[in-house]
């Protein structure tokens, strides 16, 4: 095999020296405090069985889709799924993408045009950043969850902007993937609406868990009419795969025509779509008990932090995502490795995924974690940090 170019070898060597080198590991046999499967849907036998029954009912026996949706891949389950999603999330339309990363890449690379302005929370997901980078718009980050910082950036850069007919987009998340915290969405929506700006919210870590029936924070707060677009994903609390962009029918038409990650990729398999349909059609039955258990586990975990006097190491969060800040990649990895040696699957999140000095353990709580597991985890954390 041809050797990797020397300059790339140097980049890898630098990662190793900085203690930020990534590797793949098996997670079998470890207690799960790592995955995004908050409600246990990914291992739910009822969901698995009902998905199979749906495929039989719909007489679908295909292993794959055979092409992109604009070619041969737009099979009939898409026609069942997208109206279901639009109704469930209280949106005019829904367009399914192969993943949350694809959805954000497609949305943000195609939507903002040259001369437009995009203002994004500094902690938004890499897929949003990468999508914005591929557009022709000017983009500016504002301080995390800080409406005052956003207003300052908007005032400064709209005044400087030479193109007076620019469209302004404001981008944030309803639950941030690394911190587990939430912005004041009502205040952001009010600001955007009063100024004629377009608010886009990524609900990846909110749907399934938050909302009356798992529809996320935007519908729960009755803000769906004040948000230009939303991204929802199904690989986290819904335990399957794929994502959707929610918005107007015109937005859907636009993305079908101009979102490259949608146009040029093979469509999702019928089985994947059937799983998404089943998860949403039976969400109330599947979610009721796991949601209660998850809520109890979050509260129990936070009480344990107080009992062991280590809450000061944690980012304030009332969600399933709990971040334990351990500055320094080497130290964060050491604590992670010690926990893994004790049977707990928890990974260190390192720079550049999070800002330097904000390295952390990202602890994900689940409905299926026992009180004994949580108590022992916090006890070990207290001794290691």
Image (cartoon, rainbow, N blue to C red):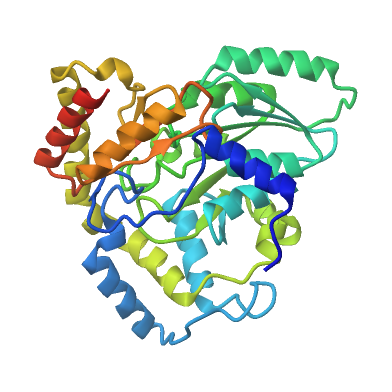
**Which quadrant holds the N terminus?**
bottom right
- Image coordinates of residue 86 in percent, x first then y, are 50, 55
Q: Residue at x 52, y 49 (%)?
A: 91
Q: Is residue 160 left or right of residue 289?
A: right
Q: Is residue 28 left or right of residue 81?
A: left
User: Does any portion of residue 125 appear in the rendered image?
Assistant: no
Asked which quadrant contains residue 302, the reply is top left
Residue with the most extreme left position: 372
- Image coordinates of residue 79 in percent, x first then y, are 53, 71
User: Does any portion of residue 176 appear in the rendered image?
Assistant: yes
- Image coordinates of residue 250 in percent, x first then y, are 69, 53
Give the camera-side residue of 305 and 186: 305
Give the camera-side residue of 24 and 107: 24
Please determine whether, in this image, residue 370 is positioned above or below residue 381: below
Q: Residue at x 46, y 23 (%)?
A: 358
Please determine whether, in this image, residue 244 is positioned above or below residue 108: below
Q: Is residue 108 left or right of residue 273?
A: right
- Image coordinates of residue 110 in percent, x first then y, are 74, 49
Give the camera-side residue of 374 and 198: 374
Q: Residue at x 35, y 85 (%)?
A: 56
Give the camera-side residue of 91 and 258: 258
């Amino acid at each position: 095999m041809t050797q990797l170019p020397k300059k790339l070898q140097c980049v890898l060597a630098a990662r190793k020296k900085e203690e930020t080198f990534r590797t793949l590991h098996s997670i079998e046999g470890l207690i799960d405090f790592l995955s995004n499967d908050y409600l246990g849907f990914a291992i739910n036998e009822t969901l698995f069985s009902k998905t199979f029954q749906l495929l039989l009912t719909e007489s679908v026996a295909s292993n794959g889709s055979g092409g992109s949706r604009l070619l041969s891949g737009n099979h009939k389950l898409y026609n069942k799924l997208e109206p279901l999603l639009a109704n469930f999330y209280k949106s005019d339309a829904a367009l399914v993408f192969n993943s949350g990363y694809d959805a954000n890449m497609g949305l943000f690379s195609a939507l903002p045009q040259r001369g437009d302005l995009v203002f994004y929370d500094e902690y938004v997901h890499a897929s949003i950043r990468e999508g914005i980078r591929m557009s022709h718009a000017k983009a500016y980050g504002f301080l995390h969850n800080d409406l005052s910082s956003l207003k300052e950036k908007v005032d400064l850069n709209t005044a400087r902007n030479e193109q007076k007919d620019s469209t302004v987009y404001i981008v944030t998340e309803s639950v941030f993937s690394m911190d587990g915290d939430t912005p004041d969405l009502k205040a952001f929506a009010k600001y955007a609406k009063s100024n004629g700006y377009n608010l886009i919210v990524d609900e990846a870590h909110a749907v399934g868990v938050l909302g009356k029936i798992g529809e996320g924070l935007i519908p729960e707060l009755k803000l769906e009419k004040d948000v230009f677009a939303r991204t929802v994903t199904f690989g986290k609390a819904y335990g399957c795969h794929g994502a959707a962009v929610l918005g107007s029918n015109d937005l859907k038409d636009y993305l079908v025509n101009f979102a490259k990650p949608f146009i040029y990729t093979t469509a999702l398999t019928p089985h994947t779509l059937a799983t998404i349909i089943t998860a949403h059609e039976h969400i109330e039955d599947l979610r009721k008990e796991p949601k209660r258990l998850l809520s109890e586990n979050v509260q129990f975990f936070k009480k344990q932090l107080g009992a062991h006097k280590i809450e000061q190491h944690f980012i304030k969060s009332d969600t399933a995502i709990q971040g334990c800040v351990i500055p320094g990649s080497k130290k964060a990895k050491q604590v992670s490795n010690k926990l893994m040696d004790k049977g707990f699957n928890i990974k260190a999140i390192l720079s550049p995924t999070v800002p330097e000095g904000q390295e952390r353990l990202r602890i994900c709580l689940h409905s299926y974690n026992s009180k004994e597991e949580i108590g022992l985890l916090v006890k070990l954390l207290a001794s290691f940090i």
